[in-house]
Image: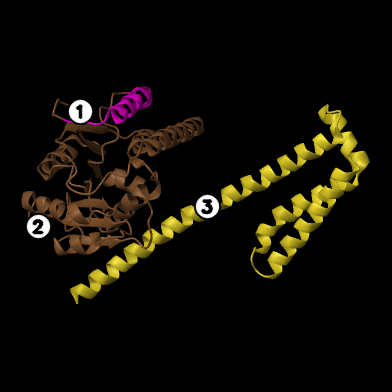
Amino acid sequence: MDRLLTVTTLLSIALILLVLFSVRRSHIRVEYSVSWLAASLALLLLSRSHGLLTWIANFLGLNDPPLALILLVFGLFLVVFYRFSVIISDLKDANIAMAQRLAILEFQLQSRHEGD
Amino acid sequence: MRRASGTNDFLIVIPAFNEEGAIAGVVRDINRVLPGAPVLVIDDCSEDGTKYTAKAAGADVLGLPYHLGLGGCVQAGYKLAFELGYDFVIRVDGDGQHDAADIPRVLAALRETGCQMVIGSRFCEHNGAHTSFLRALGIHLFRIILRPILGKPVQDPTSGFVGVNRQALEVFTRSFPLEYPEIETLVVLQRKRFQFQEIACQMRPRQAGRSSITPVKSLYYIVHVLLGVFVNILKFDSRRRKT
């Protein structure tokens, strides 16, 4: 279990650094980094708090704290993916509306130009 | 393209993607049947010369900046038609499967019945329409699903030969299914308590090119549309609870 927790700690630190680095390089916008940072900080906290993890495992009725950790990681990232699905859907809708508007404006401009 | 010049003015829209081989014939057929009628081809960022062929044949062309898919393409045409003040819009496929001679009948039905939508149906009468077994099975499945939702039977829910009036046009400029619009559109109309009618129309083999529908895509189509119908039913119910 200790090895798993150490690997999880290292992974979460790596994820935090990667996200911060990406924000600094403007590869990820600040508002979209929040979900990743929150998820990786939660992961870091869980992997360093043996007591908390055991308590959660007991609460969930699991005998194995690492299983609880995996379940929580899965749940956390599921929430992050859901959030990004919402964002992508909004962006797609906005993008389609903008493409249609652009086509209509171009059409009207050309019609006016041909009319002159 | 001119703005609608008075009441009862209509526009014919043709969504097209890579229809270089068929589009000129479709536009010319419409001009032959309805001389002087405004025809708008919506080019969904074709990779071939659809845009130029349609223009050369006498149509106005609304060129999309990137490939939006059928729903986005049709909606762009509806938005332009609405802004230009048209009262009726007839949508015809760009592959030449619909007979232009049927357009006046769809238009007349729109004007006379007051229905918000008129569907040119392949199956209303035995008019020689033939589809593949898989497709026929899919259409039958959707007939069964749509019957209780719409409160009346629909023979050809996947028809791309559709006429709408300005009321429906206004709704579709705001809300239109973006990938496979035909079936979901009926549910959207039902949510608004709009009426539709089917009239028998001829269906010809496609004039050129190949259909993009493969067995895998057919399966995806069924799942996608079922989900779309289900989501629209959820919207319908929430609206009912509010009222």
Q: Residue at image x 33%, y 66%?
A: A105
Q: Tell me, yes or no, whether the two marked residues, 1 and 2, touch with CB atoms within 8 Å.
A: no
Alpha carbons under labels 1 and 2: distance apart:
30 Å
Instruction: Report x, y in % for residue A68.
Output: 81, 35
Image quarter (top left, top right, bottom left or bottom right) of the N terminus of chain B: bottom left
Residue denoted by label 1: B123
Helix, strand or loop at mark 2: loop
- Badge 2: few (under 14), some or many (20 or more) residues near its Cα, within 10 Å? few
Helix, strand or loop at mark 3: helix
Q: Residue at image x 62%, y 45%?
A: A82
Identity, as a three-letter code, of the amino acid under mark 2: Gly
Chain B hue? Answer: brown
Identity, as a three-letter code, of the amino acid under mark 3: Asp
- Badge 1: few (under 14), some or many (20 or more) residues near its Cα, within 10 Å? many
Chain letter for the residue marked with disc 1 in the picture: B
Q: Tell me, yes or no, whether the two marked residues, 3 and 2, touch with CB atoms within 8 Å.
A: no
Alpha carbons under labels 3 and 2: distance apart:
40 Å
Residue denoted by label 3: A90
